Image: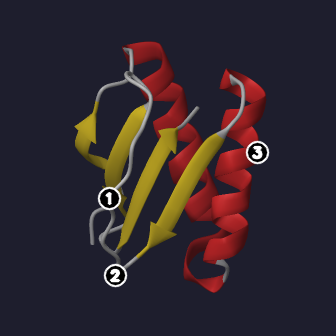
């Protein structure tokens, strides 16, 4: 199982991307499969505080999505070999 983040798509500037990846991986490491709702909440609150609201996040194993995001505010990554994290900012 890979313990590093695998970025599938990202249009963020590098500084924001690095911070977002750190926030996402930290939340999943902290709560893991025991409480994905808390992991999502931590990611959202951290991103809202660091980069201004409103951020949206989905953390899970099996889901599909169709979203509209602000330009340069989208990150989709896999972490821990089993979790996908979709993070975006909308107006």
Choose the circle earlier in sequence order: 3 or 1.
3
Q: Point out residue 75 in the picture as x, y percentages from the top left corner.
A: 38, 40
The local secondary structure at tag 3 comes to: helix
| Number of other residues with Cα within 10 Å of mark 2, as a class: few under 14, some 14 to 19, many 20 or more | few
| Number of other residues with Cα within 10 Å of mark 3, as a class: few under 14, some 14 to 19, many 20 or more | some
- Residue 32, above or below 75: below
Q: CA distance from mark 3 to mark 1?
A: 22 Å
Which residue is the site of mark 2? 62
Residue 53 bears which disc, if any? none
The residue drawn where x is 33% and y is 51% is: 77
- Residue 36, above or below 91: below
| Number of other residues with Cα within 10 Å of mark 1, as a class: few under 14, some 14 to 19, many 20 or more | few
The local secondary structure at tag 1 comes to: loop
The residue drawn where x is 23% and y is 41% is: 9
**Which-is-in-front pick, marks 3 and 1?**
1
Residue 45 bears which disc, if any? 3
Which residue is the site of mark 1? 66
The quarter of the displayed image where residue 38 is located: bottom right
- Residue 26, above or below 17: below
The residue drawn where x is 43% and y is 58% is: 85
Q: Is residue 2 left or right of residue 17?
A: left
Q: CA distance from mark 3 to mark 2?
A: 23 Å
Choose the circle earlier in sequence order: 3 or 2.
3
The quarter of the displayed image where residue 68 is located: top left
Judging from the image, the colouring scheme is secondary structure
Q: Point out residue 11 in the picture as x, y percentages from the top left corner.
A: 30, 26
- Out of 68 and 64, give the one closest to the viewer: 68
The local secondary structure at tag 2 comes to: loop
């Amino acid at each position: 199982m890979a313990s590093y983040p695998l970025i599938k798509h990202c249009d963020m500037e590098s500084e924001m991307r690095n911070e977002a990846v750190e926030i996402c991986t930290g939340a999943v490491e902290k709560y893991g499969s025991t409480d994905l709702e808390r992991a999502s909440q931590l990611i959202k609150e951290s991103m809202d505080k660091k980069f201004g609201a409103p951020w949206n996040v989905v953390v899970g194993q099996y889901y599909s999505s169709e979203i509209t995001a602000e330009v340069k505010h989208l990150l989709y990554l896999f972490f821990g070999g089993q979790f996908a994290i979709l993070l975006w900012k909308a107006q």
